[in-house]
Image (cartoon, rainbow, N blue to C red):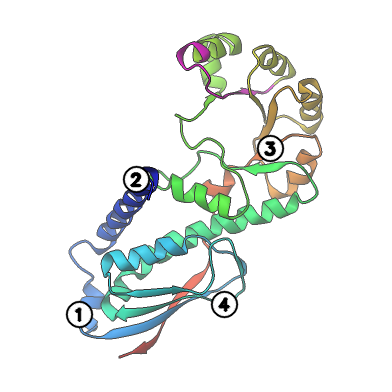
Amino acid sequence: MMAKEISEELWLDSLIERALSEDIGSGDVTTESAVDQHKKARAVWISKQNGVVAGLDVARKVFQILDEEITWEACTKDGNTVADGEVLARLDGNARAILTAERVALNFVQRMSGIATKTAEMVDLLKGSSTKILDTRKTVPGLRMLDKYAVKTGGGLNHRIGLFDMALVKENHIRTAGGITPAVQKIRSHKPGVKIEVETTTLDEVKEALMAKVDMIMLDNMNLQTMKKAVEIIGGRAETEASGNMTSERLREVAATGVNYISVGALTHSVAAFDISQQIKEIY
């Protein structure tokens, strides 16, 4: 196993342990009072809607971190489209542990599957177009890697992961640095070779960003006519990203302007949880 994979696994284990600690606290009063500690159970996870599932291995980890003897059998895999009523997974083990871990496991998978499902819907709307869907940093603090994994599972692309892996010069950076050109110059001096994107709202800003030879130009909250003109001016000399109030209803017409990417904050900041039910089928 590579060092990066080990690091990611430790991070996920730590995240799950914090989530379980937050929920269980000093103990699961209901389960520990009502369920005999020696009882075992068989349970299933059932999808209650159509959509794209994501996070099943995270759920497995939740149950097995609480009780390593619980068995988890996934009946589908991340990225698959599932139907209302479809069995997603089967569990077998200590009844108390299955009941206590239920909500934390569901919370992770319902959020991740909601993101994957919404992403897949938007990707599908752009079929036949060369424009791709991008996510943003508008994620739940501490859950970014899971949120972005869910976007990829739904067929979208990840923008920068954080502040460290590319430079994105936004309006407040431009004001603080004294303009697009000085901001870009300072970044290149401080961090040679880093990919640079600049946020623009006018055609004059687009031209200045082009003169600065940035890698990517964000066309932020532009109307369609201005956006199309901006794409023509750029002429392939930089990648283009459309941003700002990107709803499902607008995607096709925005893509028609010729932009390379459309970033959608709502994929992660306004996600609707995917409906999944855990049902105990047998006690023994």
Of pointers 3 and 1, the one earlier in the residue sequence: 1
Q: Which residue is mark 3?
A: 261
Mark 2: secondary structure: helix
Judge from the rendering whether residue 62 lies leftward or rightward of residue 83; answer left or right: left
Amino acid type, mark 3: Tyr
Q: Which residue is mark 1?
A: 33
Q: Classify residue 25 by image quadrant.
A: bottom left
Of pointers 2 and 1, the one earlier in the residue sequence: 2
Image spot of residue 233 (x, y percent):
79, 20
Question: Along the line of sight, which residue is nearer the eye, 241 or 174?
Answer: 241
Q: How many residues crowd around disc 4 within 10 Å: few (fewer than 14), some, or many (20 or more)?
A: some
Of pointers 2 and 4, the one earlier in the residue sequence: 2
Amino acid type, mark 1: Ser
- Would you say the residues marked 3 and 2 are in contact, meaning their CB atoms lie under 8 Å apart? no
Using the image, determine if residue 227 lies above or below residue 247. above
Task: Give the extent of the magenta segment.
Answer: 188-201
Q: Which residue is mark 2?
A: 7
Taking the spot 58% from the left edge, 46% from the top edge, the residue there is 266
Of pointers 3 and 2, the one earlier in the residue sequence: 2
Residue at the farthest left position: 26
Q: Classify residue 195 by image quadrant.
A: top right
Amino acid type, mark 4: Glu
